[in-house]
Image: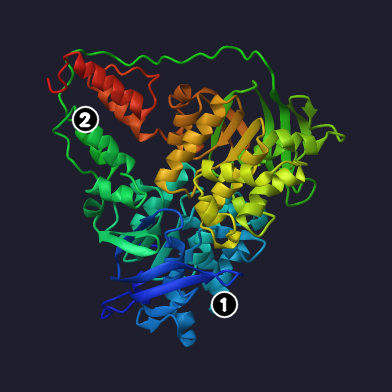
Amino acid sequence: MPFFNVRMGCSKQMKKMIELNHVQYSYILPSGERIQAVRDISFTIQPGEHIAIIGANGSGKTTLVQLINGLITPDSGWVLVDGYFTSDRNHHADIFSKIGLVFQNPRDQIVASLVEEDTAFGPENLCLSHSEIRERVAASLTMSGALHLKERQTYLLSAGETQRVALAGVLAMRPACLIFDETTAMLDPQSRKELLDVMTTFHKQGFTIIHVTHDLDEVLTADRILVLHAGQLVLDGSPYEVFKDEKALREYSLILPDLLKFTQDLRSYFPDLADFYRSEEALLTDLGKIPRSGVGGERTNKMIQQNDLEEDFIHFNHLSHTYMAGTPLAQPTLQDITFSLAKAESVGLVGHTGSGKSTLLQHLNGLIRPQQGMVRIGEFDLSRADVDVKTLRQQVGLVFQLPEAQFFEMYVGDEIAYAARTLGYTGKLRDLVQIAMQAVGLDFEQFVDRPLFSLSGGQKRRVALASYLVVQPQVLLLDEPFAGLDPLIHQEMIQLVNRLKEEGKTLILSTHTMRDLLQIVQKAIVLHSGKIVSQGTTVDLFFQPDLHDWGLEIPLELRIAEALRKKGWEIPVEMVRWDSIVGWLRTRMAGGVDARF
């Protein structure tokens, strides 16, 4: 049975749901300078279409969806929603009831202190009956996967939990069009899959779906893809049409989705595969049809053993933490956490949304002090009341999950220099700021005097990391550092983090993206409901039988390798990166083994 009848929001006679005509929009900086975010954009969206919007950081995606939703109005041109001009304030209520937008930063749309009350806020403003409001709240929280949070305080939610609650608030309004602005960025793999399935379900029920994302694999099931570059609409077509020209994509700072890149590589060895797939399952099904290798062989569940740590540099001993401890609202977050990390070692911290990853990281630089148990980093015992926190933070840098939470200044250059000034650095900061900005892909002249509010989400994340590169800490704590980055910058940032690791920095990376884990660290710690449920190598991790229950998934490259092993290709299990897997196939083929026998 459909969640609810979306067609009540759109007339059968209506031919166009959304129409933009030569729309332009600029942000005006305090200096009077205008930054043109959207340039002469025109397109139409029909009722029931599934539209994906992609483009590099700062290309105008969030501005565009805010124009569609009527939150901002064009400087020139016009936007029509269900026949209403967004510039006509008399019809804003009609537009807002038809277009539901889940913000890029979902905390911006949370208005109440309790989840249940926040979800009810929109329906209450429609003057609905109490029974109707209760029904909408329960249904919306269930559909967004947040029903278990209904009595939680909104200010204690993790970023991923906040996204679920924000979505529930939008669904409670029962709009005809749903806009998801980077809504999957902070979700664990299982929650992300569930949300994408929800989008598909809504689309089948008749919703108009607009999905803004940097994860290009998410857009392959869309009807159309709109590509923005420097505020302009440069491509508008089906997924096949948009991704057929890889050279053109790179001109717009985009790359092929991983699914298509892997397919392209595999076709060199298995030419009977299709040249275009819209889902991982379709590729894996076709791999199951290729002839068996004549070599044969069974997978051995070989585990990579780590040597005992020679140095106990970071140590957690029976750490537990409860938010609002001693009150009726107490929320246990970490339970009996014990692990050690050597100096210059790197580890990935993974787990479902709300599993306690951010809370654990914040114990390491003194933002949260131990309630029970002990945390030590080098000579700093954070269980002691007299620990020198200022000196600690000179050595331990934390890049927050939401970069806005750590900004203190108004302009980019001042923000990047802030931590160094605060911690007592007295040298010439301008040169260090310029080097740090270049390292994270921000042009110094273009961005140094830009107000932080004018940046995209991905650009803010780069500023946050640059501010710690100036300080040059020996320990780097990265909490979802790559969420919201466009594909090319994403890869550049991974290379940057790997360089920092090679320089001897101790690194703890919290991430929901398993592919990032494989590219950076060899060791992983899994948190589930505040407890450590697995410690070991990344190879070990993906053999765990409870992976799905922990909210995690096996990356596509490992699923491909396993499908090939079942066909007799003896790819070593320790090969977890795609370049290693393809390199193994290349070497095998060079040795005269035919993939088609």
| Residue at 35% in and 23% down | 580
The residue pinned by badge 2 equals 288
Residue 152: x percent and y percent?
65, 54
Q: Quarter of the image holding residue 449? A: bottom right
In this rendering, the answer to whether 505 lies above or below 440 is above
Q: Quarter of the image holding residue 436? A: top right
Residue 560: x percent and y percent?
30, 30
Which three-letter amino acid code belongs to the residue tagged 2? Gly
Give the spatial CA distance, label 1 vs label 2: 54 Å
- Kindly state the secondary structure of the residue where label 1 is placed: helix
Query: Horizontally, is 156 left or right of 486 in the view?
Result: right
| Residue at 30% in and 67% down | 48
Which three-letter amino acid code belongs to the residue tagged 1? Asn
| Residue at 34% in and 53% down | 252
The residue pinned by badge 1 equals 125
Asked if residue 171 can be seen in this view, the reply is no
Residue 555: x percent and y percent?
39, 34
